[in-house]
């Protein structure tokens, strides 16, 4: 007999020397049969019960894979690429996701809701949060502090929610140095530079000078793509495709044999 045959026998745990109606051992000796194997029958329930009886223990209905860990998804990309739009849609189409509300020392603007858009705190309160190590990452942006509260992440991870963080490219670099490979980093891009500029212009929220700064910054930021785990193209009019791809990434991460595990 060929070595291949022996290898297969071993791999698939073939029963050796077993005649129907005789008690025997499996080839690795783990489970001696306690009763004769059932004779061939077309009654599937009978066969199932017979196999259980032969092994002497019921087959377990416990899941064969451990439950997946909650994941932390960091979504980043140049200004105007559609980070907010993608996250907003993702929250509409998928349950079990918590988008972390950022704390900021910036004054509340009309229409903004405390606790939904941001947690509005004074500069003093913000600095106290820094002192008490309550923030995962923080930055001073145009004179205002912005930071990610740790407790919010802990609370929602304890409830098995996946966590979505939205940060700029610098924030993503800082988070990578803190979280390493325990979090999943997605770089969102437009299909081309031209498309990104058109989108920024169409949004109509910046002066021409501010637009120039954002475009120049975006050119620099593209160079950081390689530090991310995934790149997702958010093409013009194809927001749902981008969101589907983000969902696929989440699903694939949940199916990993070696699960990432975030400690915050
Ligand atoms: N796939 C898409 N097709 C067309 N327009 C889009 C698409 N995705 C986003 N937009 C639009 O592009 C503009 C920029 O999107 P958004 O504000 O979500 O970007 P952002 O990355 O969050 O920007 P910033 O970092 O400057 O806040 C918005 O007007 C948004 O509605």
Image: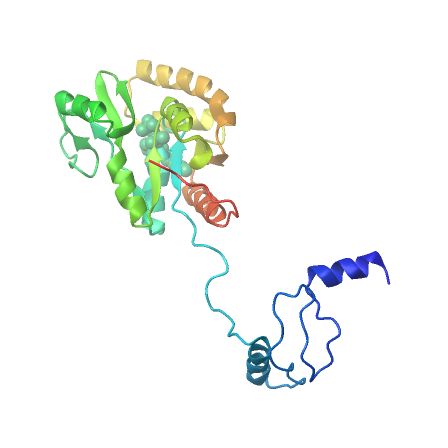
Residue 27 point in image, percent of width and height: 70, 66
Front-most of 43 and 162? 43
Residue 125 point in image, percent of width and height: 14, 25
Q: Residue at x 21, y 35 (%)?
A: 117
- Look at the image and tell me in which quarter the C terminus lies: top left
Quarter residue 246 falls in? top left
Residue 140 point in image, percent of width and height: 26, 18
Q: Residue at x 47, y 68 (%)?
A: 61
Front-most of 83 and 31? 31
- Look at the image and tell me in which quarter the N terminus lies: bottom right
Residue 90 point in image, percent of width and height: 36, 45
Quarter residue 210 falls in? top left
Q: Residue at x 67, y 63 (%)?
A: 28
Q: Is residue 14 above or below residue 204?
A: below
Front-most of 57 and 199? 57
Task: Answer with left or right where residue 192 lies relative to residue 37.
Answer: left
Task: Answer with left or right where residue 25 lies relative to residue 83.
Answer: right
Q: Residue at x 29, y 50 (%)?
A: 159
Q: Residue furthest right?
A: 1
Residue 105 visible somewhere in the drawing = no
Residue 223 visible somewhere in the drawing = yes
Q: Quadrant of ligand 1?
A: top left
Task: Answer with left or right where residue 5 lies relative to residue 110.
Answer: right
Q: Is residue 215 above or below residue 250?
A: above
């Amino acid at each position: 007999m060929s070595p291949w045959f022996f290898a297969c026998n071993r791999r698939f745990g073939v029963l050796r020397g077993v005649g129907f109606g005789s008690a025997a051992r499996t080839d690795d000796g783990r489970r001696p049969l306690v009763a004769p194997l059932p004779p061939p029958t077309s009654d599937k329930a009978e066969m199932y019960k017979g196999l259980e009886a032969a092994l002497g223990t019921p087959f377990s209905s416990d899941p064969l894979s451990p439950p997946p860990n909650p994941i932390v998804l960091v979504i980043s990309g140049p200004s105007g690429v559609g980070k907010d739009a993608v996250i907003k849609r993702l929250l509409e189409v998928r349950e079990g996701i918590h988008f972390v509300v950022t704390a900021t020392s910036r004054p509340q603007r009309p229409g903004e809701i405390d606790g939904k858009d941001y947690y509005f705190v004074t500069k003093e309160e913000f600095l106290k949060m820094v002192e008490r190590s309550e923030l995962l990452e923080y930055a001073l942006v145009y004179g205002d502090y912005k930071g990610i509260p740790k407790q919010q992440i802990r609370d929602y991870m304890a409830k098995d929610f996946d966590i979505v963080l939205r940060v700029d490219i610098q924030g993503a670099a800082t988070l990578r140095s803190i979280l390493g490979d325990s979090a999943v980093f997605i770089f969102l891009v437009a299909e081309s530079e031209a498309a990104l500029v058109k989108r920024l212009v169409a949004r109509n929220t910046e002066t021409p000078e501010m637009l120039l700064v954002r475009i120049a910054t975006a050119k620099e930021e593209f160079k950081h793509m390689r530090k991310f785990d995934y790149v997702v193209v958010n093409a013009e009019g194809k927001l749902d495709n981008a969101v589907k791809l983000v969902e696929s990434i989440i699903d694939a991460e949940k199916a990993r044999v070696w699960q990432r595990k975030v400690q915050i």
